[in-house]
Amino acid sequence: MDELTREFLIESQEGLDRMERCLTDLEERPHDTELLGEIFRSVHTIKGTTGFLGFKRLERLAHAGENLLGLLRDGKLSANQVIITGLLHLMDALRGILKTIEADSNEGEGEDAELIGRLHDLQHPEAAVASLNAKAAVGNSAQAKAAPPAPPMVHQTRPSLPAIPDAETAPAPKAPANRPAQIEAKGPAIESKPLADAPADPGKPKVMTTAASDSTLRVDVMLLNRMMNLVGELVLTRNQILQATSLDPNLTLLSRRLDMVTADLRESVMKARMQPVSNVFSKFPRIIRDLSQALNRKVRLVMEGQETELDKSLLEAIKDPLTHAVRNSLDHGIEPPDVRIAAGKDPEGTLKLRAYQESSHVIIEVSDDGAGIRVERVRAKAIERGLIAAERAAQMAERELLQLIFLPGFSTAEAVTNVSGRGVGMDVVRTNVEKIGGKVEIDSRPGKGTTLRLRIPLTLAIIPALIVRSLNQSFALPQGALSELVHIPPERVSTAIEYMEGTPLYRLRGQLLPLIFLDRLLSPGSASTSLTSEARAERDNFIAVLDADGRRFGLVVDGLADPEEIVVKPLSGVLKSIGLYSGATVLGSGDLALILDPGSIASRAGVAMRAQEEEQAGIVQEEAETDVMASRYLLVEALERRAAVPLGDVLRIERIPLSRIEYIGYRPVLNFEGQLLPVEDSGGVLAAAGGNPEAQLTVVVCREGNRHVGIAVSHVLDVAAGSELFEAGSQHHASGVTLLKDHVTGIVDLAAVPPLPFGSHGEASQLNEWTTETVA
Amino acid sequence: MRALIVDDSRFVRDFLRGLLEEKGIECEEASDGKAGLTHLHDGDPFDLALVDWNMPVMDGLDMLKNMRAEGYADVKVMMVTTEAEDDFIIRSLDAGADEYLMKPFDNEALTEKLAMLGFVEA
C-alpha cells in the first residue's frame, strides 16, 4: 500500500472517530451547529479525498451521508433519534469499507444501495429541500463520472514525488489503530505552543478539531520504540560511565552533565509515547448507547480525567479489559428502570469512567450505581462451581469473597446474555491487567453499586525492579508484584521453613505461604547447583513475597541487591520459550540480568499452590471437627526442631542429668522405674550434650503397645490440640504430620523405635547389672 | 517561488505538496484558515495560497476575505474545492480568489491552473 493511501486511511478513521464522539453528543444537543459542522466535515473530507484514490463505493456512500448532513448543518433538517441511528449506520459502513481497503487494498464487494436509499429518505421531511438535493446529487454523479479514473493518477505522480522532509510533515506510516487526532490535540510533548485557540463557546464541551498541524507532528510508533531503546542504551552507558569516572574530577563533572541530559531525554521520549486515555474512553459512549438499548437500561455515562496520559502500548492493552468491565456494569450492575424505581433510585443509572494518576500508576475506575454484588451469591456460586471449599467460604470476609469473582470459571450471571456471561469472566480482566504489571481491585456495596479499579503502571519500557541473587547470578524482580521481603537468618532456616508433602512453606503472620526456591526452579534436579537443605541452613535466605496470578507466594533467593530502574529489553526466542522471564536488562554494573516473570513462576509452581489451598481448606475442616476428632499432642523441641508426641501415649516427662543415660552397645537406654527404656534420639540431643554428665536433658516417656520408650528432647514446649493431617510413611521418624499452634509438625513415630536386643520389656533388676557393666 | 497549502486534510496537503515540490515550488502547510493567516503574517512572503473551502476554526472563504482585507493583494489565491460546492466558487471569486481547482484533481489539472496564473508553463 502506498503512503498516500495509508495517509488517507488513517485520516478517514480519525474523522470517523470524531464523528462517533460528536454523534453521541448530538443526542443531547441536536441543534448544536458546531457538532453538526464537525460531523459534516468528517464525512465531507472522506468524500473529498476518496476521489483522489478512486474508491467509488466509499465515495457514493460518503456522498449520500454528506447530503443529509449538509441539510442538518444548515438547519434545514432537525436531528432526531432516527437520523442519528442512520448516521451511526453510515459510520459503521464507512468503517467497514476502510477496513477492507486496509486489508485488501480494494473496497471489496458490498451492497450499499439500501443504506444510501435510507439516508436519502431521511432527507425527506421537507420535500422541496429533498428534491433540490436529489438534483444536486444527479449533477454531482455526472461530474464524478466525467472525472478521469483516479488510481492511475496517483500512480503516475507518486513515484516521482520528492521525498518529503521529515521535519515538516513526517508522513510516516502509522499503526492504523492509533488515533492521531488526539495525539495532535494533546500532543506528544513535542509541541511548543498552545493549540488552536478555537472559538469554542465556553458553555459547550469543546469539539475536537484537527487543527494544530503546525505545532505537532506525527511520528511512527516503530520509530518511537527505537528511540526508547536507544535511550535505554544511553541510560545504561551513562550508569557505567558514572561508575568508571568517579576518580577523575574533570570526567566526573562531564559525566554528571551526561547524567542530567540523559534523564531529561529519557523523560521526553517516554512522554512522546503517552496518549490520553480519552483515546480508549471515546468508544464507550457508543457501546453504552447500543448496550443500554439492547438491555433495556437507562444509563448516563460520566467520564472524568480523559486527559490522563498512559503509554500507548498499555492503552492498547487495557482496551479489552475495560470494555469487559463496562459491559459487566451494564449487564450485572445497573438494574432495569422499573427495578430501580422500585428500589427508590433514579430510573437512569450512572456509569462513571474515571482516570487519574497516582504516583507512578494510572488508576482507571469503572463505577456504577447499580445493584452491587451480593456476596452471598458469590459465595454460593463459588462453592457450586467447586472453586472453593464450603467450609473455607463460610469463614471468608466480604472483601475476600468479592475477590472470588476473579477466579477462572466464575460468573454470577444467572442467564447467559448477549452481552456478558459468555464464559469469559473477570478472570480475563485480571489476567490481562496483570500481564502489563497492573492490578485489579473491586469494591461493592449491595444496592449502592460497584467500583472496579484498574491500577496500571505508567510505562512498561522502564520499570522499577529489585535485583536479587541466586546461583551467583543477578535477576530483576519487577516491583509491581513484590509486596514484602522476609529475611531468614541461617540459624532460623531449619525451623522457619516447614515442609508439607515436600512443599516448602513459610508461616507469614499466621498464613501459610508456599515457597519457591529460585535456585531449584532454575536448575531442577541438579543437586550440584541447588542447595541442599543443610547447605541452605548455613546461610541467609530471603523470601520475596509476590502477588501474581491471583496468588501469593514466596520466592526464596540467596541475596538482595539494590532496587534499580531497569530498561526492559525483549528476549530472544530461546529464552522466551523457557517461560520464566519477561525480558532482560543490563544493570548499572554492566551485568546482564534476566527479568523474572512472577506470573509464570506462580503457574510453574502451581502444584505447590494447590497444595496450599487444600491445606487451608484442611485447616478449616479440622477446626470444624475439632470437638470429635482432635487429638492432643505434646509439643516438643529437639535442637530447634519441633515434633509432636500423642499426649495419650505420654506417661511421664523426666528431667534428668546426662549421666543417667546408659548404653547397650551404642543404643542409649534409661532406667525408668525399674524398667529399661530405649531412648529415641533422632533429634541429636544426647550428642549435643557433649558427654557432660551434668548436662540436663528431658526424656518423654511414652507407652508404645506393650512396651515403653523414651524420647530425648531439648524442651517440652506445650500441649496443643490438633489432628493428624495425613500419613507420611516415607518421612523419617514421623508417623504423620499435624498442625499444632499454626505450625506443621511431624508426629514422632513411637512404633519405629527399635526394640532392645533382649526383648521389649526386660526386668530392670536383671538388666541393670548388665548395662552398668557395659557402661563401666 | 513559495506556496501555502491550507487544508484540514493531511492527505490533501501531502498530495499537493508532492505535486508542487516536483515543480520546484517551496511549500508550507496550515490546517485551517486561521493557521494559514498566521503563516502569512509570520513567514517569508508567499506567491500562492491553495485554500480549501470547508475547514474547522476558519473556513477558506473567511481566510480569503481576511487576506484581501489585510492587504495581501500580491498573493494569488487558488480555491481548492469539491464538486458539491459549485456555488461557492462564484462566491470565492467574488471575494477575490484568482483561480479554483476542483477535487479530485491530478497533476495535469493542477499544472493547467498554475499555468493560468503564470507560475508554470502549461
Image (cartoon, coloured by chain):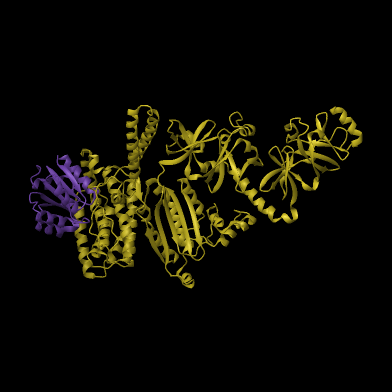
Residue B42 percent coordinates (x, y): 15, 47
Residue A397 percent coordinates (x, y): 58, 57
Residue A137 percent coordinates (x, y): 22, 60
Quadrant of the drawing holding the C terminus of chain B: top left
Residue toward you, A572 or A610 = A610
- Residue found farthest to the right: A766
Q: Is residue B120 left or right of residue A131?
A: left
Q: Is residue A447 left or right of residue A61?
A: right
Residue toward you, A106 or A700 = A700
Q: Is residue A282 above or below residue B47?
A: below
Residue A333 percent coordinates (x, y): 48, 62
Q: In this view, does A571 lie to the left or right of A184?
A: right
Residue toward you, A629 or A343 = A629
Q: Which residue lies at the image location 12% right of the left edge and 56% below the top edge?
A: B66
In the rendered image, which quarter is residue A460 located in? top left
Quadrant of the drawing holding the N terminus of chain B: top left
Q: Is residue A70 visible?
A: yes
Q: Is residue A177 visible?
A: no
Residue toward you, A310 or A171 = A310
**Colour chain B is painted in:** purple
- Residue found farthest to the front: A694
Q: Which residue lies at the image location 45% right of the left edge and 46% below the top edge?
A: A436
Q: Is residue B101 above or below residue A243?
A: below
**Colour chain A is painted in:** yellow
